[in-house]
Image: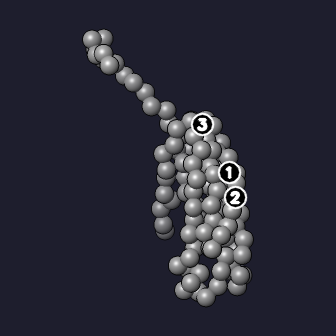
Amino acid sequence: MSRVKTYQHYQDEAVQYNVDWSVRVGKLSTSVSSVVWSVESGSAAVSGEALAANVASALVTTSSIDCSLIKVKATFADGQIDVHFFSTRVDEPTCITTNSSNRY
């Protein structure tokens, strides 16, 4: 079983993601016909989906502190389907001061 890669985000951040199937479809002598991006869990949003030269791209925006699971489903010209997952974990930085004499 493969591990789902997790990316760190900050709240209200928008990050461009790419999924590249070039090597896989090259070995299979096919191409990517279509790609569907979806948020399987969490509060992230996906927009600006594009597909060019077997590389899918989209903008993932996070709006609240949580973890989101993103699914990217590609259909190849020969009918095969490949699914890619990744997650985004949204945290906010904190500044903890234990000594009031700490000045910036």
Q: Residue at x 59, y 44 (%)?
A: 14
Q: Mark 2 or mark 3, which is nearer the start of the sequence?
A: 3
Residue kind at label 2, given as amino acid type: Glu
Farthest residue, direction top? 100
Label 1 sits on a secondary structure element that is strand
Which is in the foreground here, disc 1 or disc 2? 2
Which residue is labeled 1 in the image? 46
Give how far apart the Cα atoms at labels 1 and 2 are. Answer: 8 Å
Q: Is residue 30 visible?
A: yes
Vertical arrangement, residue 28 with respect to residue 68, above or below: below
> Contact, CB < 8 Å: mark 1 with mark 2?
yes
Q: Identify the residue shown where x is 63% and y is 51%.
A: 59
| Mark 1 → mark 3, Cα distance in angstroms | 13 Å
**Crowd around label 1: few <14 · some 14–19 · many ≥20 (10 Å):** some
Q: What amino acid is labelled 3 in the image?
A: Asp
Q: Secondary structure at mark 3?
A: loop
